[in-house]
Image (cartoon, rainbow, N blue to C red):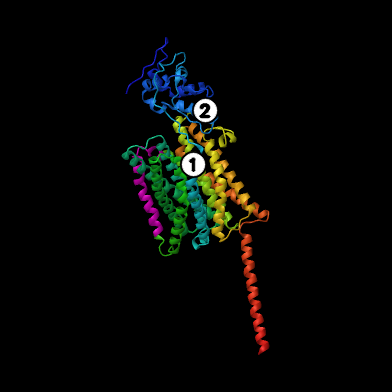
């Protein structure tokens, strides 16, 4: 590699010494503190900073080279128009003097490799998000319809703990698969998915990692459902506990295994056609995920329940079999350079999110007995909220990886921003937040009308229901997007990779907020005299009663007529 030389000043500070390798944080902090995003275009001067850094910092040049110009470009993108781009070729004498106070900068004759902050036109982002968003929406509708059908099955009426299990399992699937999508999307955007051998290693390591997390987390969430159910029902049955555990582990591992291959295919597809995987992978992961998870859970639980008295041993074989496979998956993950670190550091958010989703399960278990049709809309509001915030989380994480290093907040954003700046106009990713919020409104209206028509065989919802549902769903999405901004930047500041840690918390909060807000909406509708579904049931009951009375009157008249004729 050709090493670019820089001019020496009288005090020798024009060239970065070798000892600079021990002060990376101070270099970046000094540069960020000195930079002013409103000074104009940094391309006016040479790039002695980039050239000097590449030549003299050695192996530190890789992570840092070109990122500070990207930070400045991102700052301009946040303060300027939504479509402003970042050319990433800055540097200049100012940068040189910031790194080496008193120096005169470099020779100004060269440019380091450009680090371009990827920007998209608003319509490109909208189209790429809209297609998987609506596919995912119909997936959540299907999940709600399936849950509405199976809620009266014997296994669900006899083992109510399964309702506690549903949100937690759906959230677990989302946590694990969306984290995988976020990790691989970031690697794709950073240009690291090159070489068939490395891609295969990354895929195998990530799929094995998800299986490890699914086995452990599904076992823990089943224990949570069993304990809470025993407390609420004041009873405990061992056969039911084994059924819950076996069904939970089978559902989590099977659905994640299927979805992981779908995700990998989507990400490789987007890489091939130069699309942004952040916009496509996470919504598509959720589009079929809820349907697959609920179908597998209800089918397996029903099958085991039908034979539980004679074949209880099957549940033991299933649980023991998964724990036998667990060490092999752990070994694969541990030996994989792409996932070995996550094996030890990715558990806290996954397990914490399970208990948050479990609280949402308690809300669902309570609401099922109170409101007709609640289970139809609960997967929709939870799924859409989780899908949209996962898109935003993946994009923010990718931008941070492109423009900074762990522990350093780039100048185009802060941890705590005003909600207006974070969601509408101010920071570079506010554009995506606006698109997600605006897209959710017509999408939610379409989804609830379709779900209602399928569930009730005709349209029964009116203006009060639509307005109330839109209010709570939009409030949920806006809260999630703002929380995503805060939590991702906070994790970045604490040197925690948000690709592995942010999405579990966000999707779990989406489940809890969605279920809670929807229950409040149903309570409000009942209080104002517009409860969902009950008017339909009353009409059906009234029609049945009227038909019965008419039939009885006709029969009685015929009998009287025949009697008088006789």
The magenta stretch spans residue 482? no
The magenta stretch spans residue 330? yes
Residue drawn at x 44%, y 42% is 179
Whether residue 496 can be seen here: no
Q: Position of residue 41 (x, y in %)?
A: 49, 23
Of the two numbered discs 2 and 1 on the same chain, state the one appearing first in sequence. 2
Tag 2 residue: 76
Report the span colored magenta.
314-343
- Between residue 354 and residue 90, name the one nearer to us: 90
Whether residue 501 can be seen here: yes
Tag 1 residue: 391
Rounded to the nearest angstrom, the CA distance separating label 2 from label 1 is 23 Å
Q: Position of residue 249 (x, y in %)?
A: 43, 52
Report the disc number at residue 40: none
Which element carries disc 2, helix, strand or loop? helix
- Between residue 482 and residue 449, name the one nearer to us: 449
**Compared to 14, does 316 lie above or below?**
below
**Compared to 449, does 501 lie above or below?**
above
Q: Position of residue 328 (x, y in %)?
A: 34, 46
Q: Nearer the viewer, mark 2 or mark 1?
A: 2
Q: In the visual, does 526 lie left or right of 390?
A: right
C-beta proximity under 8 Å, tags 2 and 1 = no
């Amino acid at each position: 590699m050709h090493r670019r030389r820089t001019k020496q000043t009288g005090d020798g500070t024009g060239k970065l010494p070798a000892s600079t390798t021990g002060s990376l944080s101070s270099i970046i902090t000094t540069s960020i503190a000195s930079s002013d995003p409103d000074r104009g275009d940094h391309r006016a001067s040479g790039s002695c900073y980039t050239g000097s850094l590449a030549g003299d910092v050695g192996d530190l040049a890789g992570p840092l080279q070109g990122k500070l110009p990207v930070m400045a470009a991102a700052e301009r993108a946040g303060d300027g128009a939504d479509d402003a781009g970042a050319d990433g070729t800055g540097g200049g004498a100012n940068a040189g003097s910031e790194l080496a106070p008193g120096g005169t900068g470099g020779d100004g004759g060269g440019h380091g490799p450009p680090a371009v902050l990827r920007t998209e036109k608003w319509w490109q982002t909208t189209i790429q998000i809209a297609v998987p968003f609506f596919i995912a929406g119909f997936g959540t509708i299907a999940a709600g319809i399936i849950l509405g059908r199976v809620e009266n099955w014997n296994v669900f009426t006899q083992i109510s703990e399964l309702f506690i299990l549903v949100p937690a399992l759906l959230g677990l699937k989302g946590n694990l698969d969306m984290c995988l999508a976020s990790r691989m999307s970031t690697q794709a955007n950073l240009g690291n998915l090159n070489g068939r051998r490395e891609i295969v290693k990354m895929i195998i390591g990530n799929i094995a990692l998800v299986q490890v997390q699914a086995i452990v987390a599904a076992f823990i969430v089943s224990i949570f459902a069993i304990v809470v159910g025993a407390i609420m029902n004041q009873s405990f049955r061992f056969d039911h506990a084994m059924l819950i555990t076996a069904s939970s582990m089978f559902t989590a591992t099977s659905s994640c295994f299927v979805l992981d291959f779908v995700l990998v295919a989507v990400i490789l597809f987007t890489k091939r056609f130069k699309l942004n995987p952040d916009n496509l992978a996470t919504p598509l992961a959720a589009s079929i995920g809820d349907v697959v998870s609920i179908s597998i859970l209800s089918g397996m639980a029903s099958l085991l329940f039908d034979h539980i008295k004679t074949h209880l041993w099957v549940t033991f074989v299933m649980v023991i079999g998964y724990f036998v496979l667990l060490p092999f998956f752990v070994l694969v993950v541990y030996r994989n350079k792409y996932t070995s670190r996550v094996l030890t550091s990715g558990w806290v958010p996954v397990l914490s999110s399970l208990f948050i989703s479990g609280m949402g399960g308690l809300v669902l278990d309570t609401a099922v007995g109170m409101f007709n049709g609640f289970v139809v809309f609960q997967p929709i509001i939870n799924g859409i909220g989780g899908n949209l915030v996962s898109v935003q989380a993946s994009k923010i994480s990718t931008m941070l990886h492109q423009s900074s290093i762990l522990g350093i907040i780039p100048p185009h954003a802060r941890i705590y921003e005003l909600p207006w700046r974070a969601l509408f106009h101010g920071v570079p990713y506010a554009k995506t937040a606006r698109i997600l919020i605006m897209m959710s409104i017509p999408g939610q209206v379409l989804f609830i009308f379709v779900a209602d028509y399928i569930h009730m065989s005709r349209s029964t919802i009116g203006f009060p229901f639509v307005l109330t549902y839109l209010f709570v769903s939009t409030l949920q999405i806006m809260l999630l997007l703002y929380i995503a901004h805060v939590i991702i930047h906070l994790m970045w500041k604490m040197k925690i990779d948000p690709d592995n840690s942010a999405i579990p918390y966000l999707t779990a909060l989406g489940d809890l907020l969605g279920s809670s807000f929807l229950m409040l909406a149903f309570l409000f509708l009942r209080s104002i005299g517009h409860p969902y579904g009950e008017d339909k049931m009353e009409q059906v009951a009234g029609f049945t009663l009227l038909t019965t009375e008419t039939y009885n009157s006709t029969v009685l008249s015929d009998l009287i007529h025949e009697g008088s004729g006789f």
